[in-house]
Image (cartoon, rainbow, N blue to C red):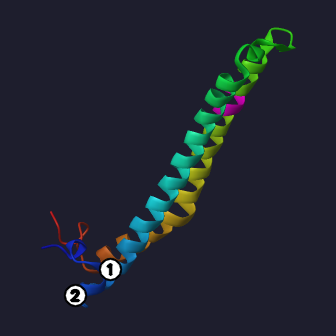
């Protein structure tokens, strides 16, 4: 049985790296959940606008550009912005904790943490 198979409250006391792994797992899960919500919102808003506005999305805004095209461009820019946010958040938070775990593994002389 591996240490991650134990419930958090009953894990053996001889696993201090478990807390760091758990924090990294929890943080990455939280970031992924936020990314998913933001991307689903960026996709759902144009779909809902198309549902409720219908043919009004074909109204010209400037030249050949319509309201529907403008909504899609805003959705694409929102998805790109969330991808950049996610990358920055991972570099700032997850990578720092992963580097700490790699440093601990290097101290013990094992790059795999004892699992192969």
Query: Quadrant of the rendered structure where residue 12 is?
Result: bottom left
Q: Quadrant location of the C terminus?
A: bottom left
Q: Nearer the viewer, residue 17 or 4?
A: 4
Residue 74 lies, with reference to residue 87, above or below; the image says above
**Residue at image point 25% right, 86% down:** 10
**Residue at image point 31% right, 78% down:** 18
Name the mark on residue 96: none
Query: Mark 1 packing: few (<14 Cα in 10 Å), some, or many (20+)?
Result: some
Horizontal placement of 22 versus 42: left or right? left
Residue 68 appears anywhere in the view: yes
Sequence-earlier tag: 2 or 1: 2
**Residue at image point 75% right, 17% down:** 57
Secondary structure type for disc 2: loop
Q: What percent of the width, then of the height, locates residue 74?
A: 71, 31
Query: Quadrant of the rendered structure where residue 82 is?
Result: top right
* Highlighted magenta segment, given as a residue range: 72-76
Query: Mark 2 packing: few (<14 Cα in 10 Å), some, or many (20+)?
Result: few
Q: What percent of the width, then of the height, locates residue 36?
A: 51, 47
Q: What percent of the width, then of the height, locates residue 25?
A: 39, 65
Q: What percent of the width, then of the height, locates residue 42?
A: 62, 37
Q: Which residue is mark 1?
A: 17
Secondary structure, magenta segment, majority class:
helix
Q: Which residue is mark 2?
A: 12
| Residue 74 on the magenta span | yes
């Amino acid at each position: 049985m591996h240490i991650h198979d134990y419930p958090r409250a009953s894990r053996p006391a001889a696993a201090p790296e478990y807390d760091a792994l758990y924090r990294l797992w929890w943080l990455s899960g939280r970031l992924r959940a936020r990314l998913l919500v933001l991307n689903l919102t960026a996709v759902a808003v144009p779909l809902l606008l198309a549902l409720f506005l219908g043919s009004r999305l074909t109204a010209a805004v400037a030249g050949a550009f319509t309201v529907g095209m403008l909504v899609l461009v805003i959705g694409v820019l929102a998805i790109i912005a969330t991808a950049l946010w996610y990358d920055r958040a991972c570099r700032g938070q997850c990578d720092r904790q992963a580097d700490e775990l790699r440093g601990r593994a290097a101290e013990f002389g094992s790059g795999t943490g004892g699992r192969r």
